[in-house]
Image: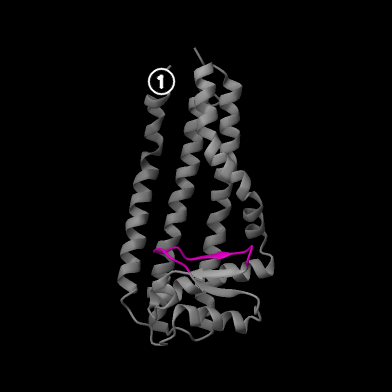
Amino acid sequence: MFPFFYDPSFILIIPAILLAMYAQNKVQSTFNKYVQHGAKLGMTGAQLASDILRKQGMHDVKTELVGGHMTDHYDPRSKVLRLSYKIYHGTSLAALGIAAHEVGHAIQHDEGYALLSLRNMIVPLASIGSQAAFPLLFIGLLMGSQSLAGLGVVVFMFAVLFQLITLPVEYNASSRALDLLTAGNYISFEEEKPVKKVLDAAALTYVAATVMAVLQLLRLLMISGLLGRRND
């Protein structure tokens, strides 16, 4: 049996690593391109978010500025939509697209969108799974305990499940964003395609994360001996 750190199964996740690098480069280049394209509307991301929320009757959702780059997110616990500086104050097509995407999450929460509710429920388990899986697996291998190594694989499954659920949640939010922007006449027909490129590039990062999680699970199954391998 190969030592844990030199296990040849590592080759399984190389495609996921390459995809993640491509996705990160794609989202950065697309954002950098369209953050320079001012939208005809002239409304900032924060103004857009507030306007859509008002029209949706969601007066209890606040919009706040958050530090960092591309740290935009919706916090369902406090019902706060947090936008980074270039999105909050920006009037670009990228700013409107990302702001609308986060509003899409707020609407999902308000409507009780099932997959979002499920994702929020398993966040603690997914966090534990991502942190505890490798230590459990490593200790199990050192002790020659397949059951302990197997437990590491089981807890990692919650992290994989989180990623699998996150993917459709993010695509749904992007679909809602585009519908909100076009139906509300916030963007013109010519601006729809660039906004979609921004949203699609962002979604690709979640595709990469999902592929990584699934391939990592397959790798852990092989290392633990639960898939096609046996301890000597």
Front residue of this view, candidates 228 and 177 = 177
Span colored in magenta: 66-78
x, y percentage for residue 116? 63, 59
Mark 1 Cα-neighbour bin, 10 Å: few <14, some 14–19, many ≥20: few
Question: Which residue is painted at 33% across and 66% down in the image?
Answer: 30
Front residue of this view, candidates 193 and 139 = 139
x, y percentage for residue 41? 42, 87
Front residue of this view, candidates 91 and 10 = 91
Identity, as a three-letter code, of the amino acid under mark 1:
Pro
Judging by the rendered image, the residue that carries numbered circle 1 is 3
The N terminus appears in which quarter of the rendering? top left
Per the image, is 74 magenta? yes
x, y percentage for residue 9? 41, 29
Q: Is residue 30 above or below residue 162?
A: below
Whether residue 230 is visible: no
Question: Which residue is painted at 55% across and 44% down in the image?
Answer: 160
For the image shown, how many numbered marks are present on the structure? 1
Quarter location, residue 74: bottom right
Q: Is residue 92 above or below residue 171?
A: below
